[in-house]
Amino acid sequence: MIRTRFAPTPSGIFTINDLHNALFSYLIAKHDQGEFLLRIEDTNQDKYDMDAENNIYAILKLFKINYDGKPVIQSERLNIYNQYAKYLIENGYAYYCFCDEKKLAKERIEATSKNITYMYDGSCRNLTDEEVKSKISNGEEYVIRQKIEKNGTTSFHDEVYGDITFENKSLEDQILLRSDKTPTYNLSNVVDDGLMNISYVTRSNEYLSSTPKYIQLYDNFNFDIPKIIHFPMIVDENKRISNISVISLLNSGYLPEAILNYIALLGWSPKSNNEIFSLKELIEEFDYKNIQKDSCYFDIKKLNWYNRKYLKMMNNDDYLKYIMPFIIKNSNMKNKSRDFVNKIALLYKEHINNPIELVEMSKIFFDDNIVYQQDCRKYLKNSELVRKIVLTFKDEIIKINDWNIELINNCLNNVSNICNISGIDLYMPIRIAISGVTKGPSLVDTIYLIGKEKIINRLG
């Protein structure tokens, strides 16, 4: 059975790259009826954030990326990692390092400032057993480092990037166990992948260069080496790793289904030409062999496109239920009747990318002072005909006693006949005059919901 895992560190925001990794790992497993496991990598308690851990559970649940069994919590398994570190020491695959951490940190900074790749010099690598015992008995702090095989090469096959070989001499003796006896990711991820029988190790390609060190650890522990899949990173417009928060997208009104659909197509190409996929459809079609190597750009415009598609597909009741909290929180519509607000929300259903846009667009129904952009002001002053259309429409509106859609339509028809104008040439001057914008939903519905008094005042 295929077994994959998502192994986040609960120390900060849950980003779109985290969601990307979780989704791809989930799809790889579920495409072949395998198991998808969750592991919380919280061994560095200095950076641990309980809210971050809770967000991991909440986001996975919201996006329906359901894990099998109970989460594995690494902070509850410290004794296991210490046993495996001891095994490495006893078998010559690791060693005690007593070097001053502050001194090493300073050396690393100096190397970076000189644009030199820093590598620990291995000064503790060949300490005798007597020297080690003496230092420990004297209470000297130590870490445990992996004793990298320095001769030859280490090779592995990545399912995305192909066969990769590293010169062992280029690999640093990494820290496996910190001075407080907690494991680093370098140790705990290999131990847990082995003990959890993970068959496909999945992670971002930023860890590609560390993989040969893990391959040596798999060999040291006599673990079967799993298949390895590195995912491309999602980057911003500056080609830096994107740290956009998933929660911030949700709070901005992006639907989980839209986000998931868009994220799935970043770095992966389906065999079909479809762009809209449910999670079930993604499971059926996903093939990790179609994951691309190159980083992928997060385009908010494309996400807007997806969100608009999903909003349109919602039935009206679900749409109103979803959008109402955003309206109540962000607009002065909260003091209006629910029926009135529902009508405005439905009026814009086909025209918005997210609920925040609705809040902004709907200001035309409440604000007494409409702000006209320069191009709109220029348009209204552009010709005598435009002015005539606006004033004629005002005269016709004033005549209405019973405010309804049919009579508003009659007004527009009358203006068309009087001014001998139709189509966009008729509607544009009126839309700009009553709303200050050039685009929007049904003009008749917009006029009706703004109300007769406001319309007359705006027509000058």
Image (spheres, rainbow, N blue to C red):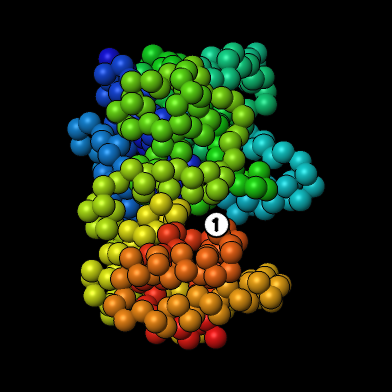
Q: Residue at x 52, y 81 (%)?
A: 459
The residue under label 1 is 423
Q: Residue 28, relative to residue 236: is it above or below?
A: above
Q: Residue at x 58, y 69 (%)?
A: 419
Give the image quarter of residue 333: bottom left
Q: Residue 298, relative to residue 160: is it above or below?
A: below
Question: Callout 1: few (<14), some (14-19), or many (20+) C-alpha neighbours within 10 Å?
Answer: few
Element under disc 1: loop
Q: Residue 146, relative to residue 365: is it above or below?
A: above
Task: From the viewer's perspective, tell me whether residue 155 is left or right of residue 30.
Answer: right
The amino acid pointed to by label 1 is Gly
Give coordinates of residue 117: x percent, y percent. Answer: 72, 38
Give coordinates of residue 14: x percent, y percent. Answer: 41, 50
Give coordinates of residue 141: x percent, y percent. Answer: 48, 49
Give the image quarter of residue 448: bottom left
Q: In the rendered picture of this protein, how many numbered marks are placed on residues?
A: 1
Give coordinates of residue 59: x percent, y percent. Answer: 32, 47
Say which of 285 and 112 sits in front. Answer: 285
Q: Quadrant of the N terminus?
A: top left
Q: Residue 194, relative to residue 105: is it above or below?
A: above
Say which of 179 and 456 sits in front. Answer: 456
Q: Residue at x 26, y 36 (%)?
A: 66
| Residue 328 shows in this picture | no
Q: Residue at x 55, y 86 (%)?
A: 460
Say which of 287 and 398 sits in front. Answer: 398
